[in-house]
Amino acid sequence: MLNEDLINLSKARMAHAEDCLREARLLLEGNEYKGTANRSYYAAFHSLRAVLILDEFDSKKHSGIIAKFREIYLKTELFNKEISDYISSLFRVRTASDYDDFFIVSKEESVEQLEKAEKIVTQIKSYLKTKY
Protein backbone atom coordinates (compact mmCIF):
# COMPACT_ATOMS: atom_id res chain seq x y z
CA MET A 1 0.00 0.00 0.00
CA LEU A 2 1.36 3.38 -1.01
CA ASN A 3 1.70 6.24 1.43
CA GLU A 4 -1.06 8.83 0.86
CA ASP A 5 1.47 11.68 0.99
CA LEU A 6 3.50 10.09 -1.81
CA ILE A 7 0.38 9.59 -3.90
CA ASN A 8 -0.61 13.23 -3.45
CA LEU A 9 2.88 14.39 -4.36
CA SER A 10 2.85 12.15 -7.43
CA LYS A 11 -0.50 13.58 -8.51
CA ALA A 12 0.76 17.15 -8.02
CA ARG A 13 3.83 16.43 -10.11
CA MET A 14 1.72 14.86 -12.83
CA ALA A 15 -0.53 17.93 -12.84
CA HIS A 16 2.60 20.06 -13.21
CA ALA A 17 3.68 17.90 -16.16
CA GLU A 18 0.30 18.39 -17.82
CA ASP A 19 0.52 22.17 -17.23
CA CYS A 20 3.91 22.17 -18.96
CA LEU A 21 2.43 20.32 -21.93
CA ARG A 22 -0.37 22.86 -22.20
CA GLU A 23 2.18 25.69 -22.04
CA ALA A 24 4.31 24.00 -24.72
CA ARG A 25 1.30 23.80 -27.03
CA LEU A 26 0.53 27.48 -26.50
CA LEU A 27 4.13 28.47 -27.14
CA LEU A 28 4.17 26.40 -30.33
CA GLU A 29 1.03 28.15 -31.53
CA GLY A 30 2.78 31.46 -30.90
CA ASN A 31 5.88 30.33 -32.86
CA GLU A 32 8.00 30.38 -29.69
CA TYR A 33 10.13 27.34 -30.45
CA LYS A 34 12.74 27.65 -27.70
CA GLY A 35 9.94 27.97 -25.16
CA THR A 36 8.20 24.96 -26.68
CA ALA A 37 11.36 22.88 -26.31
CA ASN A 38 11.80 24.03 -22.72
CA ARG A 39 8.25 23.29 -21.60
CA SER A 40 8.21 19.96 -23.48
CA TYR A 41 11.29 18.83 -21.60
CA TYR A 42 9.87 19.91 -18.27
CA ALA A 43 6.60 18.09 -18.97
CA ALA A 44 8.56 14.87 -19.37
CA PHE A 45 10.83 15.64 -16.43
CA HIS A 46 7.97 16.27 -14.01
CA SER A 47 6.22 13.10 -15.14
CA LEU A 48 9.41 11.14 -14.38
CA ARG A 49 9.46 12.72 -10.93
CA ALA A 50 5.77 11.80 -10.49
CA VAL A 51 6.46 8.11 -10.98
CA LEU A 52 9.77 8.01 -9.10
CA ILE A 53 8.35 9.51 -5.93
CA LEU A 54 6.24 6.38 -5.57
CA ASP A 55 9.55 4.55 -5.16
CA GLU A 56 10.49 7.20 -2.58
CA PHE A 57 13.18 8.57 -4.88
CA ASP A 58 13.87 12.20 -5.65
CA SER A 59 16.92 14.14 -6.71
CA LYS A 60 17.81 17.77 -7.22
CA LYS A 61 19.83 16.78 -10.28
CA HIS A 62 18.08 16.18 -13.58
CA SER A 63 20.67 13.54 -14.45
CA GLY A 64 19.81 11.69 -11.23
CA ILE A 65 16.09 11.61 -12.06
CA ILE A 66 16.75 10.42 -15.60
CA ALA A 67 19.28 7.77 -14.54
CA LYS A 68 17.02 6.36 -11.82
CA PHE A 69 14.01 6.27 -14.15
CA ARG A 70 16.06 4.35 -16.72
CA GLU A 71 17.31 1.97 -14.04
CA ILE A 72 13.93 1.18 -12.50
CA TYR A 73 11.49 1.53 -15.38
CA LEU A 74 13.35 1.07 -18.65
CA LYS A 75 15.76 -1.73 -17.78
CA THR A 76 12.83 -3.69 -16.36
CA GLU A 77 10.78 -2.83 -19.47
CA LEU A 78 7.86 -1.34 -17.56
CA PHE A 79 7.89 1.35 -20.25
CA ASN A 80 8.84 1.31 -23.93
CA LYS A 81 12.59 1.56 -24.50
CA GLU A 82 12.01 4.41 -26.98
CA ILE A 83 11.30 6.65 -23.98
CA SER A 84 15.02 6.63 -23.22
CA ASP A 85 15.77 8.14 -26.63
CA TYR A 86 12.96 10.67 -26.19
CA ILE A 87 14.31 11.77 -22.83
CA SER A 88 17.81 12.17 -24.26
CA SER A 89 16.51 14.24 -27.15
CA LEU A 90 14.33 16.41 -24.93
CA PHE A 91 17.19 17.03 -22.53
CA ARG A 92 19.70 17.80 -25.30
CA VAL A 93 17.47 20.26 -27.14
CA ARG A 94 16.27 21.99 -23.96
CA THR A 95 19.82 22.39 -22.69
CA ALA A 96 21.08 23.72 -26.00
CA SER A 97 18.15 26.10 -26.43
CA ASP A 98 18.50 27.41 -22.87
CA TYR A 99 22.29 27.75 -22.71
CA ASP A 100 23.74 27.94 -26.23
CA ASP A 101 23.42 31.51 -27.45
CA PHE A 102 23.46 30.47 -31.09
CA PHE A 103 21.26 27.36 -30.97
CA ILE A 104 18.12 27.67 -33.05
CA VAL A 105 15.15 25.37 -32.57
CA SER A 106 13.18 24.92 -35.77
CA LYS A 107 9.43 24.60 -35.88
CA GLU A 108 9.77 20.97 -36.97
CA GLU A 109 12.10 20.19 -34.09
CA SER A 110 9.84 21.86 -31.56
CA VAL A 111 6.87 19.87 -32.90
CA GLU A 112 8.90 16.66 -32.52
CA GLN A 113 9.92 17.62 -28.99
CA LEU A 114 6.32 18.25 -28.01
CA GLU A 115 5.21 14.92 -29.50
CA LYS A 116 7.93 13.07 -27.57
CA ALA A 117 6.92 14.76 -24.34
CA GLU A 118 3.26 13.92 -24.94
CA LYS A 119 4.14 10.25 -25.47
CA ILE A 120 6.14 10.12 -22.25
CA VAL A 121 3.47 11.88 -20.20
CA THR A 122 0.73 9.69 -21.66
CA GLN A 123 2.57 6.46 -20.87
CA ILE A 124 3.42 7.53 -17.35
CA LYS A 125 -0.10 8.79 -16.71
CA SER A 126 -1.51 5.41 -17.77
CA TYR A 127 0.95 3.62 -15.52
CA LEU A 128 0.11 5.84 -12.56
CA LYS A 129 -3.59 5.07 -12.94
CA THR A 130 -2.73 1.47 -12.05
CA LYS A 131 -0.90 2.64 -8.92
CA TYR A 132 -3.56 4.85 -7.35
Image: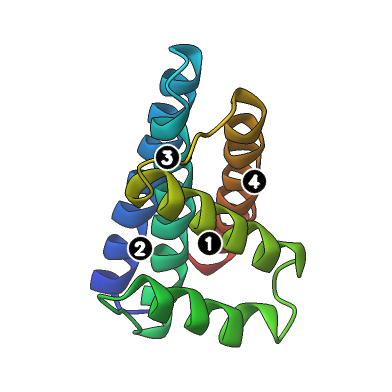
Q: Contact, CB < 8 Å: mark 1 with mark 2? A: yes
Which of the two marks, 4 or 2, is nearer to us in this view?
4
SS state under label 1: helix
Q: Residue 95: horizontal and vertical position, in percent?
A: 42, 55
Q: Amino acid at mark 3?
A: Phe
> Disc count in the image?
4
Q: Earlier in the sequence, mark 1 or mark 4?
A: 4
Q: Earlier in the sequence, mark 1 or mark 2?
A: 2
SS state under label 4: helix
- Return the residue at label 4: 116
Q: Residue 24: horizontal and vertical position, in percent?
A: 44, 30
Q: Is residue 12 left or right of residue 22?
A: left
- Return the residue at label 2: 10
As measured in the structure, the alpha-carbon distance from the residue carrying label 1 to the one carrying label 2 is: 9 Å
Residue at image position (65%, 38%) is 115
Residue at image position (34%, 67%) is 7
As measured in the structure, the alpha-carbon distance from the residue carrying label 4 to the one carrying label 2 is: 21 Å
SS state under label 2: helix
- Return the residue at label 3: 102
Residue at image position (66%, 37%) is 112
As measured in the structure, the alpha-carbon distance from the residue carrying label 2 to the one carrying label 3 is: 36 Å
Residue 26 visible in the snapshot: yes
- Return the residue at label 1: 128
Q: Amino acid at mark 1?
A: Leu
Which of the two marks, 1 or 3, is nearer to us in this view?
3
Q: Earlier in the sequence, mark 2 or mark 3?
A: 2
